[in-house]
């Protein structure tokens, strides 16, 4: 790739990709782009800005409007497709504007293990995935990130806030904001890898299995806070955190 626009979230994978690209390409041949909407925590946007600034990379923030698409907010099992279609259409237009020949995301080989309908949009818009093409797993990227001294090497995995809502249940900014506030509170308590699955008045908390005892130790504080946010029932998933747990109900 002689020039590239990178879909940059500030997560482990996209930070590593931007670092490598910044090493092998001139800065005027790279543009990092972070998309922002209510599905993306604001604190992650600020983090992405800081990382791009550290690398001296050109960085642009764009607004995406998936929440205005009824096909997305209806939350079908291929919800991710509509989100990625919105994102990639804007990234391709930007790449053309800045005369960059490729658009790349930071998907890796490990991502193939989960249900990802957004990959269809990736194929439609001819988005490249250099880390996946090179055979890198998530663990490979963490190891190499640590060797490069990247602060993201042990950063918890990110995911769109809409992924906390079961398929078929409508998505709206109010619910996303509630989920974000709840997860931010739990992170402040020390549970860095956390998911709060939303079932209207009930929530299901996922943390690593080894963190469940600590979570239970703080249960009174957690229940009080989450009830103030609007949850009537606060539950803990005894299986612990795992990627894409809401996909477990899909018959493949």
Image (tube, rainbow, N blue to C red):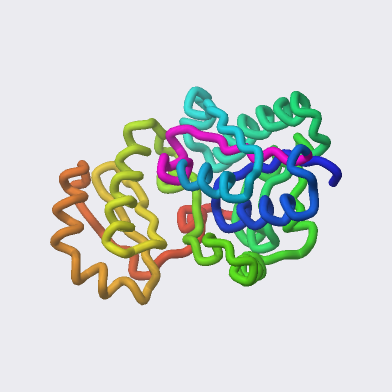
Highlighted range, magenta: 29-45
In the picture, measured across the screen, residue 68 lies left or right of residue 224, that is right
In magenta segment, residue 33: yes
| Res 143 quadrant in image | bottom right
Q: Residue at x 53, y 60 (%)?
A: 152
Classify residue 181 as left or right of residue 20: left
Residue 222: name its quadrant: bottom left
Relative to the observer, which residue lies in front, 94 or 197? 94
Q: Residue at x 48, y 47 (%)?
A: 47
For residue 201, above or below residue 205: above
Q: Is residue 167 visible?
A: no
Q: Position of residue 216 (x, y in %)?
A: 22, 69
Q: How many marks?
A: 0
Check the image and report above or below for 111 versus 177: below
Residue occupying image coordinates x 21% and y 46% = 231
Give coordinates of residue 164: x percent, y percent: 41, 48
User: In the displayed structure, would residue 2 be above or below residue 133?
Assistant: above
């Amino acid at each position: 790739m002689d020039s590239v626009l990178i879909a940059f979230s500030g997560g482990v994978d996209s930070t590593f990709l931007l670092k490598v690209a910044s090493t092998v390409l001139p800065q005027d041949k790279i543009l990092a782009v972070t998309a922002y909407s209510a599905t993306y925590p604001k604190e992650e946007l600020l983090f992405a800005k800081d990382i791009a600034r550290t690398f001296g990379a050109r960085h642009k923030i764009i607004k995406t409007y998936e929440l205005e698409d009824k096909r997305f907010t209806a939350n079908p099992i291929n919800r991710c497709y509509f989100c990625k279609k919105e994102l990639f259409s804007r990234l391709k237009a930007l790449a053309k504007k800045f005369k960059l020949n490729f658009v790349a995301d930071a998907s890796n080989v490990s991502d193939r293990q989960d249900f990802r309908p957004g990959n269809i949009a990736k194929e439609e818009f001819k988005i490249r995935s250099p880390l996946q093409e090179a055979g890198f797993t998530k663990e490979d990227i963490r190891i190499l990130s640590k060797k490069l001294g990247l602060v993201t090497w042990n950063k918890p995995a990110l995911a769109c806030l809409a992924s906390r809502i079961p398929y078929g249940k409508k998505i709206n900014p109010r619910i996303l904001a509630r989920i974000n506030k709840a997860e931010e509170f739990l992170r402040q308590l020390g549970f860095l890898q956390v998911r709060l699955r939303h079932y209207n008045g009930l929530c299901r908390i996922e943390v690593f299995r080894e963190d469940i005892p600590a979570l239970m130790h703080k249960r009174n504080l957690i229940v009080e806070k989450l009830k103030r946010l609007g949850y009537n029932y606060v539950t803990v998933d005894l299986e612990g955190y795992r990627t894409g747990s809401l996909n477990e109900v899909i018959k493949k």
